[in-house]
Amino acid sequence: MSAESPAARERLARWRVSFRHWRWQRPFWAGLLTLLASVPIVYIPYADPSFSDFSLRLATTTGSGSLIIGVLLMVLGLTFWYQRHARVFAGVAAILLGLVSLVVSNFGGFLAGFLLAMIGGAMGIAWVSGEDQEAPANKHRRGGGEPTGSASDSGGPEDSGTSAESDEPAEKADSRAEAGQLDGGSRAG
C-alpha cells in the first residue's frame, strides 16, 4: 500500500458523511425513484428489441408524448433534490404524469415507469424534514402532552403542576383563558 491510502480513505469517508447529510435534508429517494421512472417511459417507445431472428417493433404514436412525460419526470426528480420546498407540487405532478403515462406511453413503460412515478411522487408528498416534524407537535400540545382544549372541556379544575400561574385568583385566570393569553404550561380551572 502506498502512503496516500489513509488520506484517500479519509477523503472518501468525509465525502460519504457529507453525502449522507445532504441526502437527509431532502426527499432523496423520492427524487431517485422519479428519475428512474422516466427511463422506461422514454426508452420503451423508441426501443427496437430483437431476439435472434424475432424482432419486436412497437410502432405507436406515443413517441413524442413519452419523451415529454419522461423529460418532465426527470425535471421533477431533480426538483425533489434541489428545491425541497416544492416537494408537494413535484409529488402531485409526478403522480399525475405517472397516471397519464398509462394511456400515452405503452402502459407507463410496461407498468415499471408508472409504479416508480407513483411511489416516488407519494414519497415526495409524505417527506418531512427533521425540523418540520418537531415544530407542529409542540404547537398543538401543551406542557404535559395533553391535547389542547379550553378549561370548560375538562369539566373541572386540573392540577397544573409547576406553572407560576397556579397561584393566581380563579377569576383572573378564567378571564385570561377566555382571551387566549395563557401560556402553554397551565390550564385554568
Image (cartoon, rainbow, N blue to C red):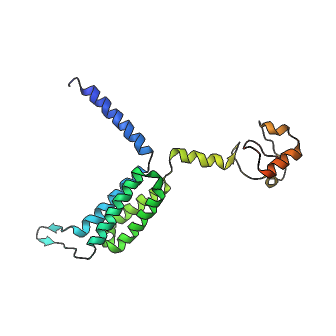
Q: Which residue is at 24% across, 25% downward?
A: 4
Residue 111 placement, left or right of 144? left
Q: Nearer the viewer, residue 104 or 85?
A: 85
Residue 150 placement, left or right of 30? right
Q: Nearer the viewer, residue 61 or 33?
A: 61
Instruction: Confirm whether residue 71 shows in the render.
Output: yes
Instruction: Confirm whether residue 109 shows in the render.
Output: no
Instruction: Please determine whether, in this image, residue 124 is positioned above or below residue 55.
Output: above
Q: Which residue is at 56% across, 47% downward?
A: 133
> Residue 61's image quarter?
bottom left
Instruction: Please determine whether, in this image, residue 39 is positioned above or below residue 57.
Output: above
> Residue 111's image quarter?
bottom left
* Image x and y of residue 98, in percent: 38, 66
* Image x and y of residue 137, in percent: 62, 48
Q: Which residue is at 40% across, 50% downward?
A: 82
> Residue 159's image quarter?
top right
* Image x and y of residue 40, in percent: 29, 63
Q: How many marks?
A: 0
Residue 151 placement, left or right of 38? right
* Image x and y of residue 29, in percent: 40, 52
Instruction: Please determine whether, in this image, residue 174 is positioned above or below residue 162.
Output: below
| Quadrant of image for the N terminus | top left
Instruction: Please determine whether, in this image, residue 88 is positioned above or below residue 96.
Output: above
Q: Which residue is at 77% across, 47% downward?
A: 181
> Furthest residue to the top?
3
> Furthest residue to the left?
53
